[in-house]
Image: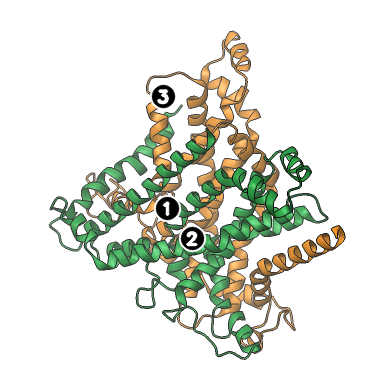
Chain colours: A green, B orange
Amino acid sequence: MVLPATIILFVVVAIPIGYGFYLSLTSYNPVETTGPRFHGLAGYAEVLTSAEFWRALGVTGAYAVGTLILTVPAALGLALLVNGKFPGVGLFRGMMYLPRVVSLVAVSMIWLWLYSREGFFNYALDLVGLDPVEFLTDESTALPSLIVMRAWKALGGSMIIFLAGLQTIPQELIQSAAVDGAGRLRTFRHVTLPLLMPITTYVVVVDLIYLAQSFSEIYILTSGGPLGSTTVVNMLVYKQAFENFQLGEASAMAFVLFCMIFALAYANVRLLGRSKK
Amino acid sequence: MKGAWRWRRTAVVALVTAVVMLPFWWLLSLAFKPETEVFSYPPNLLPREWTLDNFAYVWETTNLPVALTNSVVVGVLTVLSNVMAATAAGYAFARLKFAGSRPLFAATLGAAMVPAVVQLIPLFLVTQRWPLAGGNDLFGEGGSGLLNSYAGLLLPLLVQPLNIFLARQFFLDLPEEMAEAARLDGASELRIFWSVYLPIARPVVATIGVLSFTGAWEDFLWPLVVVSSPDMQTLPLALSTYAASGVVQYGPLMAATVIATIPVVGVFLAAQRHFVRGLASGGVKG
């Protein structure tokens, strides 16, 4: 009964990983007819010394961390705010979750207009008397604009996870803290927050892994530009492979990213394992 | 004091909701505005005149109907294949003892951690060189393989390792007595799975269905490399093509986005009850 799934996973995951690793040790341009030319670790050396790759890695990190800095505190604050019953709580949670359900590509279409010259944000700037901004084509605003969009998309989903975490905290703990004379703030700092640490770690690491693989919204809104300021690693891999046809080098980049993501995932498992003890 | 806190909370909640919903408001507003109003300045929060022209325009002048069909076909086939293969595998990992069960399950979990970009290039080459497809010979030379085909689009979506994991967690929680009773009656293992356990697995089937469908519906990078013909584009590809074509016509673009979004929101709302319960039961034993 595991056979169908195993065969499929073997063909679409195991073989490609093995083949991809082999490709990463070669120089391969499919336009030439000679096929992949084996050159060992030279491709990795090239990637690890390439300024372009390190820049893309930096952009990826800035994008992921920037998004998390906007999302996590806001999501936690909102979860605290709406933890409990009030009229319309279901509707509110449903609406907050909507950006998570709608696909990144659809979301990008909406924000393409919001950020456009005649879009909402420039209208808002105009209302307060500021000059229009070319959000997506100006080197200084392109990445922050993408981050704001992505934070908007991630907020509701993270909030729901924090809510689930808050509901596992026994009410007696909160009440006994109140009996001991702790105020709201102190209860939060010394009771709620420590108990929420595991779920916060989970949210941060899972989102980091996910955000490190961003592609579609960047492809659509900026294609990695202007001047490479939004070229994340996935964008660089795509361009090297399918625009410049450097399949060997692109494979090596993909594997370096893989190793970094794997390290993150491993750290996550270790951190969570420790906090459970 | 308490009353003031409540009032402030309501105000903050209302404000946050308004900010989060604002982009959707503009999406709908632009989709239902006539073209002349789309570029009017300042932009109107509500269309002065409501119209379906934008929908008619994208439907008649672009490949949107084809892309919608392609997305539905790929989505439905992805759901079917994941529900069948992932529940069967998850059931076997949870309830049957067989040689290699543990390492195979570990490998499945490992597969879940591989970023899509690592598979991208080799899987593209595998797709292109698929033997005896798209004019290829037995050794995968000469043609375009599975590029520009449903099979090519489906390849990485057929079984998602996470779904196997969810199914396994669900079946782990079910009592063994049911299988023993059926075994005494002489039922085969396949039959026990099919007639005893699968019928009560609706929450996890719903979860797998929703996750597979939305995953297939949103997929962008893989269709981007595997499809070059407009006839095989899925909705995300079609949308990105419209957005990239010189002067963007926002009215029709937003109408197309609305059409592309309704099915996922619908699926999510319809399955929400099952979906939330299924995820929760999957999370008991981590």
* Residue at horizontal 68 percent and vertical 47 percent from the top: B272
- Measured in 3D between alpha carbons, the distance from the residue under mark 3 to the one under mark 2, in whole angstroms, is 37 Å
Label 3's element?
A: helix
Report the mark closest to the observer, 3 or 2: 3
User: Closer to the camera, B235 or A98?
Assistant: A98
Q: Residue A65: percent from the left, percent from the top?
A: 47, 61
Disc number placed over residue B101 in the picture, else none: 3
Q: Are marks 2 and 1 on the same chain?
A: yes
Q: Left or right: where does residue A44 sit relative to residue B166?
A: left
Q: Which residue type carries mark 1?
A: Leu
Q: Is residue B121 visible?
A: no
The chain holding disc 3 is B
Corner quadrant of residue A225: bottom left
Going from N to C along the chain, the mark reached first, 3 or 2, is 3
In the picture, the quarter occupied by the N terminus of chain B is bottom right
* Residue at horizontal 62 percent and vertical 34 percent from the top: B281
- Measured in 3D between alpha carbons, the distance from the residue under mark 2 to the one under mark 1, in whole angstroms, is 9 Å
Q: Left or right: where does residue A222 sit relative to residue A123?
A: left
The chain holding disc 1 is B
Q: Residue A1: percent from the left, percent from the top?
A: 46, 26
Disc number placed over residue A124 in the picture, else none: none
Label 3 neighbourhood size at 10 Å, few (<14), some (14-19), many (20+)?
some
What residue is disc 2 on? B234
Q: Are marks 2 and 1 in contact (CB under 8 Å)?
A: yes
Disc number placed over residue B153 in the picture, else none: 1
Q: Which residue type carries mark 2?
A: Thr
User: Closer to the camera, A138 or A110?
Assistant: A138
- Measured in 3D between alpha carbons, the distance from the residue under mark 1 to the one under mark 3, in whole angstroms, is 30 Å
Label 1 neighbourhood size at 10 Å, few (<14), some (14-19), many (20+)?
many
